Amino acid sequence: MGDSGGKSGDKNVVITYETLFDILRREKDREELQNLDKTFYSDVVKYINEKRESLKQSQETLFSDDDREKTQIQLQNIKRILKELYNRREKKIIDSAIMKSRTNSGIIDTAAMLEEEKKLFSEATAILNRARAGILFNVIEGREPESIECTNTPKAAGTNSAGADSAKEEGKEQQKETRMVRILHAVPQFYGEDAELYGPFEEEDVASLPKEIAEILISKERAEEIIEENQG
């Protein structure tokens, strides 16, 4: 399963849009996992955050900066590349776990797996082994199959090590940092600093937008803030 010839594993590779595309292409072209740098995911996180920071710094030129638009498009494409790369590697790892469970083979090569992927392989194999013993072996012996219990409850997507409470607090904070605006002039579709897509908006549309984006639209006289008055 290992790929000692994978260029990405021979030396540290600087993460760029082009190298990510090349890594995905190689993953598509081979049945085995290609070698990646041990710090691949950390390097990608750093690269994405640098891209987002550049978007944040160019916020004042939201509608006119060609470089900003290019960065926005790249961020969206990077997400697609990473999802496809992960899906392809995930399938190869799960296929290896199935083979390991079925054959109890000791020659499954995990050398090309990243540390996170080795944990996935190990846990997937353990679950498959429990299922095989609890279902197949019992049925073969004329016994009712046993239900399979997973020992770990997966975290919700987006929850970090600080726990669900921290995620909820962040969500509340983000909700506070929005503005309700009425669109005064048509605004084409655009990407915000969070790489999310906004718009398009037509005249008289009402939208709740992140504070920074709302303030830019207001300063450019494309929108006005809607002040909610408390009813007595």
Image (tube, helix red, strand yellow):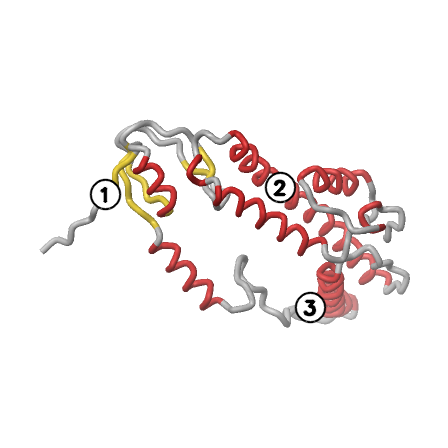
Q: Which mark is residue 226?
A: 1
Q: Which mark is residue 78?
A: 2
Q: Position of residue 27 (x, y in %)?
A: 77, 43
Mark 3–mark 1 Cα distance, whole angstroms, equals: 61 Å
> Which comes sooner in the sequence, label 2 or label 3?
2
Q: Is residue 135 left or right of residue 108?
A: left
Q: Residue at x 33, y 55 (%)?
A: 176
Q: Looking at the picture, does residue 131 appear above or below residue 34?
A: below
- Label 3 Cα crowd, 10 Å radius (few <14 / some 14-19 / many 20+): some
Q: Looking at the picture, does residue 137 appear above or below residue 210?
A: below
Q: Position of residue 75 (x, y in %)?
A: 57, 40
Q: Looking at the picture, does residue 59 appear above or below residue 134?
A: above
Q: Secondary structure at mark 1?
A: loop
Residue that carries the numbered disc 3 in the rendered image = 145
Q: Amino acid at mark 2?
A: Ile
Q: Secondary structure at mark 2?
A: helix
- Label 1 Cα crowd, 10 Å radius (few <14 / some 14-19 / many 20+): few
User: For residue 200, what is the image quadrant?
Assistant: top left
Q: Residue at x 74, y 49 (%)?
A: 89
Q: Amino acid at mark 1?
A: Ile
Q: How many marks?
A: 3
Q: Residue furthest left?
A: 232
User: For residue 26, what is the image quadrant?
Assistant: top right
Q: Looking at the picture, does residue 84 appear above or below residue 152?
A: above
